[in-house]
């Protein structure tokens, strides 16, 4: 996702420099202002709701940073200011805006056309679905490509800037199908932006890093915006494993165009400010980015919602600004450990950024919004935070034809919708029987409402023949304002009758723990292994003929079927199971992920003399071992090869030791635990036990 550098005219260069050479001034240097205090309070609310350990913010107005600060959570509650210079955070998917700007610059220079097929610029891009030829560059930026979602194998790493997830993307896509016709609807898709990164490189004839540095970072004067391979360790905000107070290594995403950049809050706000006027882009391009691209495909008519896609932007109609005739553009970003929110008011020459270690990007976006409202109010622009309410309606008799809409609905979760002739709708969660069911009642406007009238559902049959579970709700978050939800939460799963024996077989297979086999040794997947091991009974309970949102095709294949906009249909993957010559069960995801049945892991041998070796085979798959009775209580010392690492877990999947996280070279083993060795093919681990 790069493009060739052109010589700017003296006039344009002067304009660019005038908007970009912003020298941030810390709150301590200028003295804390009323704006600083208000910002600190709202960021504190975001930290509390998201349980963040650290946060930074910055507000940009008319060419300069007018407020900034950093705080960390205090042990007794609340937060305390950081005295050091602004920390650097991963900005996650806010990186997509930088990618979008790069593409728009190339379009301005005539080197690409947003509405031309991606294959025109990336001839090597191929898929096992002929519709891929219809994917345009625009569809990558508005999330409507129809791609499955995230081919992130070895893409989220610790202290390892390997770009393997990007360099292998075309190979991974070559065997995939599309989940929807290109352009049918916008559903959040990371792979689209990794493809856009490759488009920039192909068209510009330079690396993505070089393109962004020359055409964005330097032009905007960004001095504290980084790639994962850069050296900023002394400035990086600490991140932690839940329940552990030891700082973790750098959080590296190998899909930079989709989510891998780092920045300070001041640099991110300054970048947002650069998108409030011409210079980095022409006004026509800025307007194109802010257009309601989501409306070009399937989307519920009602609103507002947390999502309303533009080009790159998550929301171009952000509440409460949109209801007050103020354009607000929003992008959030979440990695495993960092969370970012950027809000830009282009007509008001305002931008605000909130970055946290831990937390949730949505809360950061809301905090950034709350910072900007008093500035607008002080300038005479009223911003009323309306408490949205459902239109008045009365309970009524439900049309009998709605009974056909009962059934199972799927998205990231599975919902069971039961309807009674008296107009009662009961929604439950088959995979989470501990969660109480919810009851709604039919009203004369066609909605089902809860008894308090605070949330509502509709069952909507769309033009594509699918039925959707529409939800409306409004959350009141003290200190952050209101968060509206108005979206298709799930799609009704088409009936798929299968033999009961086949259903039981799949339920049994998918009810066990699995182990990742083709992840890089530094992968963050290993740090979250507990979630893979602690499979709750009934977790795969779903609709008949399905496993979760995957439709049972036959004895070895499951197919992803959800076609829903927003986030309900994001990150899908088909699944195939295979048995090797030893009868071991393997799980192959269509996005490239490969897993093995945990029961197939051999028991670790400590050797007759307390010395053994484990070597990574030519296929590069990780070596997993169970800790048996003979190894219980022993200390294992590991002589490490290059480009490799090991992880040790207890019986509950908690990390006991890791060469990747804490440079451990030994670990005390406990029966029932697990050990994994991963690295380059041929990497040999020498083990001694005492």
Image (cartoon, rainbow, N blue to C red):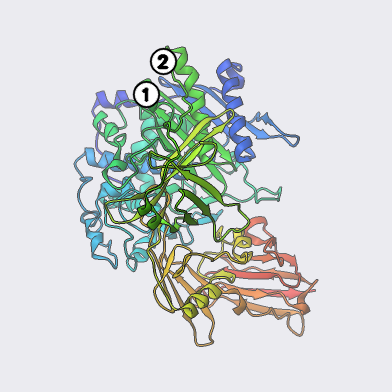
The part of the image, by quadrant, that contains residue 556 is bottom left
Tag of residue 381: 2
Query: Could you tell me which residue is drawn at 26 percent across and 26 percent down?
Result: 12
Q: Where is residue 278 in the image (x, y as percent from the top left)?
A: 29, 27
Q: Residue 540 sits in which quadrant?
A: bottom right
- Camera-side residue of 90 and 363: 363
Q: Considering the numbered disc 1 on the image, is that residue within a helix, a strand or a loop?
A: loop
The answer to whether residue 129 is visible is yes
Residue 264 in view: no
Mark 1 Cα within 10 Å, few/some/many (few <14, many 20+)? many
Q: For the residues marked 2 and 1, what is the alpha-carbon distance in whole angstroms?
A: 9 Å
Q: Are marks 2 and 1 in contact (CB under 8 Å)?
A: yes
Q: What residue appears at the point 53 percent right and 85 percent down from the top-left corner?
A: 583
Vertical order, 95 against 366 (above or below): below
Q: Where is residue 592 in the image (x, y as percent from the top left)?
A: 43, 67
Which of the pair 661/186 is nearer the observer?
Answer: 186
Residue occupying image coordinates x 40% and y 36%: 217
Q: Label 1: which residue?
A: 326
Residue in view at x 26 percent, y 49 percent: 137
Would you place residue 137 above or below residue 608 in this image?
above
The answer to whether residue 509 is above or below residue 251 is below
Where in the figure is residue 286, as x and y percent of width and height? 29, 32
């Amino acid at each position: 996702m790069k493009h060739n550098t052109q010589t700017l005219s003296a006039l344009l260069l002067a304009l660019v420099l005038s908007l970009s050479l912003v020298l941030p001034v810390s709150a301590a240097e200028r003295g804390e202002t009323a704006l600083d205090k208000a910002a600190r309070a709202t960021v504190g609310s975001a930290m509390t709701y998201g349980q963040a350990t650290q946060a930074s913010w910055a507000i940009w107005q008319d060419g300069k940073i007018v407020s900034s600060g950093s705080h960390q959570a205090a042990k007794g509650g609340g937060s305390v200011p950081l005295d050091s210079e602004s920390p650097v955070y991963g900005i996650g998917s806010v990186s997509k805006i930088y990618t979008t700007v790069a593409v728009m610059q190339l379009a301005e220079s005539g080197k690409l056309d947003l509405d031309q097929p991606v294959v025109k610029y990336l001839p090597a891009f191929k898929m096992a679905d002929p519709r891929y030829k219809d994917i345009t560059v625009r569809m990558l930026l508005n999330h409507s490509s129809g791609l499955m979602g995230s081919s992130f194998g070895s893409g989220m790493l610790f202290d390892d800037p390997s770009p393997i997830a990007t360099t292998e993307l075309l190979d991974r896509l070559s065997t995939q199908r599309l989940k929807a016709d290109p352009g049918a609807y916008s559903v959040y898709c990371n792979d689209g932006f990794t493809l856009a990164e490759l488009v920039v490189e192909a068209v510009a004839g330079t690396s993505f890093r070089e393109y962004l540095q020359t055409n964005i970072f330097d032009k905007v004067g960004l001095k504290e915006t980084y790639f994962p391979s850069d050296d900023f360790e002394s400035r990086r905000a600490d991140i932690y494993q839940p329940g552990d107070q030891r700082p973790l290594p750098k959080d590296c995403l190998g899909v930079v165009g989709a989510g891998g950049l780092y920045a300070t809050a001041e640099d991110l706000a300054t970048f947002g400010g650069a998108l409030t006027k011409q210079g980095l882009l022409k006004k026509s391009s800025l307007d194109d980015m802010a257009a309601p691209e989501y409306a070009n495909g399937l989307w519920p008519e009602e609103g507002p919602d947390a999502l309303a896609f533009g080009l790159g932007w998550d929301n171009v109609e952000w509440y409460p600004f949109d209801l007050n005739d103020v354009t607000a553009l929003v992008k959030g970003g979440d990695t495993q450990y960092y969370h970012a929110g950027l809000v830009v008011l282009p007509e008001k020459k305002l931008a605000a950024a909130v970055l946290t270690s831990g937390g949730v990007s949505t809360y950061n976006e809301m905090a950034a919004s709350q910072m900007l409202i008093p500035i607008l109010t002080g300038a005479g622009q009223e911003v009323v935070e309306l408490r949205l309410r459902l239109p008045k309606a009365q309970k009524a008799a439900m049309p009998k034809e709605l009974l056909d809409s009962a059934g199972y609905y799927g998205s990231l979760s599975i919902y069971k919708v039961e309807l009674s002739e008296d107009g009662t709708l009961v929604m439950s969660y088959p995979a989470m029987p501990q969660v109480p069911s919810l009851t709604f009642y039919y009203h004369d406007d066609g909605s089902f409402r809860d008894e308090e009238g605070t949330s509502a559902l509709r069952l909507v049959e769309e033009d594509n023949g699918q039925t959707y579970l529409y939800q409306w709700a409004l959350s009141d978050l003290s200190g952050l304002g209101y968060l509206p939800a108005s979206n298709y939460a799930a799609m009704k799963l088409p009936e798929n009758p299968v033999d009961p024996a086949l259903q039981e077989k799949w339920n049994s297979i998918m009810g066990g723990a699995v182990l990742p086999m083709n992840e890089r040794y530094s992968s963050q997947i290993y740090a979250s292994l507990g979630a893979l091991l602690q499979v709750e009974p009934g977790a795969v309970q779903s609709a008949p003929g399905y496993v979760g949102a995957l439709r049972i095709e036959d004895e070895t294949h499951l197919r992803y079927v959800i076609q829903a906009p927003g986030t309900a249909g994001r990150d899908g993957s088909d699944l195939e199971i295979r048995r090797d010559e030893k009868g071991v069960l393997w799980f192959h995801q269509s996005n490239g992920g490969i897993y093995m049945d945990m029961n197939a892991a051999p028991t670790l041998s400590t050797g007759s003399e307390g010395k053994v070796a484990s070597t990574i085979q030519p296929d590069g798959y990780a070596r997993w071992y169970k800790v048996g009775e003979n190894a219980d209580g022993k200390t294992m010392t590991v002589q490490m090869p290059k480009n490799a690492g090991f992880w040790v877990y207890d019986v509950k999947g908690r990390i006991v030791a890791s060469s990747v996280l804490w440079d451990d070279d030994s670990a005390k083993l406990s029966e029932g635990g697990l050990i994994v060795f991963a690295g380059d093919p041929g990497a040999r681990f020498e083990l001694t036990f005492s």
